[in-house]
Image (cartoon, helix red, strand yellow):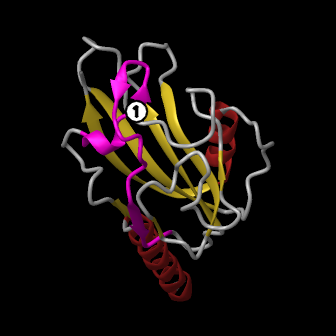
């Protein structure tokens, strides 16, 4: 009986250490900051907005054990569509990558690591699409998430919808780290 108790205690300790490790997964950005309005650089250039339309520099650390790739999403849950608005979808980022430079999400994806793919956004094209809420709808939340995945590549076609990519991300996610900012006009 004593051996079983010690085995159980050891298993619980290991599980709590694993959980603490997953809780340490974090995402940072010098410009996309929690509780601050997005700077002009990350505002869309079109749809009545005139921003820089550059994706922010991002850094993440302490991914869960077993991570084989990353995906990044930027989502506005407050868009008046009934389903929100996908501003950026990047996936198949190699596991050894832990940062992206500013403007990595340009239409050509020149700042992305080899193998990374940008999915279509709700603007209809791949690449970063900055904040551009309709005038008079108040400040919208912009949720930037890095997802640690248990697969090296998501099994989606190159023209997959953001919803399909999101489904595959959720089916293969080991953990995620989130930054939320806001913007209104």
| Rendering coords of residue 145 (x, y %) | 45, 49
Q: Is 41 inside the magenta-drawn segment?
A: yes
Q: Residue furthest bottom?
A: 3
| Rendering coords of residue 75 (x, y %) | 46, 35
What residue is shown at x 35% (from left), y 24% (from top)?
49
Q: Is residue 29 left or right of residue 72?
A: left
| Rendering coords of residue 132 (x, y %) | 37, 26
Check the picture and name the quadrant holding the N terminus: bottom right
What residue is shown at x 76% (from left), y 37% (from top)?
159
Check the picture and name the quadrant holding the C terminus: top left
Up the image or down, 138 lies above or below 6; here it is above
Up the image or down, 98 lies above or below 73; here it is below
Q: Which residue is disc 1 drawn over?
A: 44
The image quadrant that residue 67 belongs to is bottom right
Q: Residue furthest left?
A: 36
So how many labels did they put on this image? 1
In front here: 32 or 102?
A: 102
What residue is shown at x 32% (from left), y 59% (from top)?
29
Residue bounds of the magenta highlight: 38-63
| Rendering coords of residue 108 (x, y %) | 62, 50
What residue is shown at x 23% (from left), y 18% (from top)?
138
Up the image or down, 79 lies above or below 158; here it is above
In front here: 100 or 175?
A: 100
Q: Residues within 10 Å of mark 1 (few under 14, many from 20)?
A: many
In front here: 118 or 12?
A: 118
Identify the element where label 1 is drawn.
loop
In front here: 27 or 173?
A: 27
Q: Is 112 inside the magenta-drawn segment?
A: no
């Amino acid at each position: 009986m004593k051996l079983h108790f010690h085995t159980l205690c050891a298993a619980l300790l290991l599980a709590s250490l694993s959980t603490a490790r997953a809780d340490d997964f974090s995402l940072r950005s010098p410009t996309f900051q929690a509780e601050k309005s997005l700077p002009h650089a990350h505002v869309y250039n079109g749809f009545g907005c005139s921003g820089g339309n550059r994706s922010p520099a991002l850094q993440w650390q302490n991914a869960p054990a077993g991570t084989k790739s990353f995906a990044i999403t930027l989502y506005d849950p407050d868009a008046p569509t009934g389903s929100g608005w996908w501003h950026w979808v990047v996936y198949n980022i190699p596991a050894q990558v832990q940062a992206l430079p500013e403007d990595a999400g340009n239409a050509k994806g020149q700042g992305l690591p080899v193998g990374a793919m940008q999915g279509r956004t709700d603007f209809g094209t791949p690449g970063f699409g900055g904040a551009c809420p309709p005038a008079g709808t108040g400040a919208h939340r912009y949720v930037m998430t890095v997802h640690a995945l248990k697969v090296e590549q998501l099994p989606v076609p190159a023209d997959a919808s953001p919803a399909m990519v999101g489904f595959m991300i959720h089916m293969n996610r080991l953990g995620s780290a989130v930054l939320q900012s806001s913007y209104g006009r």
